[in-house]
Amino acid sequence: MYKRNWKPSKSAKRAFAEKMNEIEAFCCEHGIHASASNDSYYFTLNGIHYRVSNHSIETSNSRAYDWTGTQVRDKYHADERDPDTVYIHAGKTRIIEIYEDLAAGYKLDGRGNRI
């Protein structure tokens, strides 16, 4: 049976592009640094370092090796997590919400949801 791949509509593409432009402007305004792929965001708020990403550093580093175990590129992160950094796993479209919650003083779990 023929299965058609899902493709977003033009309006969905436009809405996502507008959201990403909004996120980029917000990041510039608040000193939030993004990775080259815009999947990870790094910032310091009230003296605490944060990393908001849709993947863990372990996952990122695992892709430095091919299926045979041969290293094909440099690792993006150190082998261990930085104890002075709070790691939040959430999609890139939630960076504004997460930043504003942290700035307002809310405690967040590892997924960026209010506790």
Image (cartoon, rainbow, N blue to C red):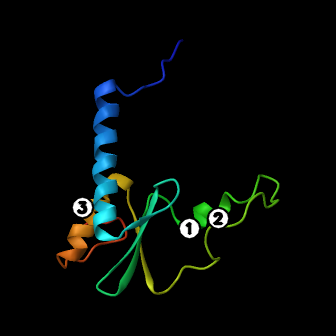
Residue 61's tag is: 2
For label 3, the crowd category at 10 Å Cα-Cα, with few meaning under 14, some 14 to 19 and many 20 or more, is: few
Q: Amino acid at mark 3?
A: Glu
Left or right relative to 60: residue 107: left
Where does label 1 land, which residue?
57
99 or 67: nearer the eye? Answer: 99
Residue 45's tag is: none
**Image quarter (top left, top right, bottom left or bottom right) of the N terminus:** top right
Give the structural element (helix, strand or loop) at label 3: helix
* CB atoms of marks 1 and 2 within 8 Å: yes
Q: Is residue 88 above or below residue 25?
A: below
Instruction: Answer yes or no: is residue 115 visible.
Output: no
Marks 3 and 1: which is nearer the front? 3
Q: Looking at the picture, how far across and down is residue 83, in whole percent?
A: 49, 86
52 or 58: nearer the eye? Answer: 52
* Residue at 64 percent of width and 64 percent of height: 61
* Residue at 50 percent of width and 17 percent of height: 3
**Dot 3 or dot 1, earlier in sequence:** 1
Q: Amino acid at mark 1?
A: Ile
Instruction: Answer yes or no: is residue 9 visible.
Output: yes
Give the structural element (helix, strand or loop) at label 2: helix
The quadrant where residue 17 appears: top left
Q: Looking at the picture, how far across and down is residue 95, in whole percent?
A: 32, 60
